[in-house]
């Protein structure tokens, strides 16, 4: 089967790191800034960064509705940190005018870990990812406050949900793209390959 093409939303955030991680995980990766660049993608990554800025830029670039349509289309989407916030159906501690795309029936609390500890690393065991825990890099990270029945909790840390999946939409509070371990990206690329069949 041909190599899947996966976009990385490149309005703001750690785009380059995701492009590299996806390349290592055997996908063709390309940055996406404009609605027409969503065409032909097999999957999409929403990077870490700053979700209020990303939300604002998505509105400015006319990307909000095209991105929502992409998520609704059922193609796989993976959000890390700010990206997790973007795929949340509901948000706590967001800015008043902050928009999300939705996609996962969950309530995410923005900057939840940030209040306790700006940034830290911790070993996180993720269901469905063999080979032992991944190194979770948490930077002003959100956590998942609650999930609906259709959502699978893949990982918790310190009693808080930090990785979830609903159908083809995946989200982590932490940043696997900032480590040399690309197993989470490989898991996502696998999801993309299966969705294409
Ligand atoms: N705290 C950031 C936000 O609200 C997310 C941080 C991150 O992506 N590392 O968007």
Image (spheres, rainbow, N blue to C red):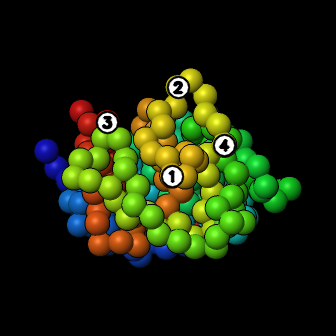
Mark 1 or 4, closer to the camera: 1
| Disc 1 crowd, CA 10 A, few/some/many (<14, 14-19, 20+) | some
Q: Are marks 2 and 4 in contact (CB under 8 Å)?
A: no
| Label located before the other in sequence (1 or 3) | 1
Mark 2 or 1, closer to the camera: 1
CA distance for labels 2 and 1 = 21 Å
- Closer to the camera in the image, 27 or 185: 185
The residue where tag 2 is placed is 150
Mark 4 or 3, closer to the camera: 4
Say which residue appears at 58% left-offset and 73% top-offset: 119
Instruction: Check the picture and name the quadrant holding the N terminus.
Output: top left
Residue 159, horizontal then vertical, whole percent: 57, 46
On screen, residue 195 above or below 53: above
Q: Quadrant of residue 141?
A: bottom right
Q: Are marks 1 and 3 in contact (CB under 8 Å)?
A: no
Label ID, residue 157 = 1
Instruction: Check the picture and name the quadrant holding the C terminus.
Output: top left
Say which residue appears at 45% left-offset and 64% top-offset: 122
| Disc 4 crowd, CA 10 A, few/some/many (<14, 14-19, 20+) | some
CA distance for labels 2 and 4 = 15 Å
On screen, residue 16 above or below 106: below
Residue 43, horizontal then vertical, whole percent: 39, 49
Residue 54, horizontal then vertical, whole percent: 65, 65
| Label located before the other in sequence (1 or 4) | 4
Mark 3 or 2, closer to the camera: 2
| Label located before the other in sequence (2 or 1) | 2
Is 149 left, or right, of 3 in this rendering?
Answer: right
**Which residue, as the protein is rendered here, is positioned at the far left?**
1
The residue where tag 4 is placed is 145
């Amino acid at each position: 089967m041909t190599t899947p093409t996966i976009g990385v939303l490149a309005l703001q955030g750690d785009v380059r790191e995701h492009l590299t991680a996806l390349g290592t995980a055997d996908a063709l990766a390309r940055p996406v800034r404009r609605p027409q660049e969503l065409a032909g993608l097999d999957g999409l990554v929403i990077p870490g960064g700053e979700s209020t800025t990303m939300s604002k830029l998505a509105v400015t670039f006319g990307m909000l509705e095209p991105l929502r349509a992409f998520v609704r289309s059922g193609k796989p989407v993976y959000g890390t940190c700010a990206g997790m916030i973007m795929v949340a159906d509901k948000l706590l501690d967001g800015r008043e005018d902050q928009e999300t795309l939705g996609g996962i029936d969950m309530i995410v609390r923005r900057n939840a870990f940030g209040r306790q500890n700006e940034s830290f690393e911790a070993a996180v065991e993720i269901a469905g990812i063999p080979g032992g825990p991944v190194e979770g890099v948490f930077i002003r990270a959100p956590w998942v406050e609650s999930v609906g029945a259709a959502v699978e909790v893949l990982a918790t840390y310190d009693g808080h949900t930090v990785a979830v999946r609903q159908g083809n939409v995946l989200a982590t509070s932490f940043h696997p793209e900032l480590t040399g371990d690309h197993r989470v990206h490989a898991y996502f690329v696998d999801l993309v390959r299966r969705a294409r069949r």
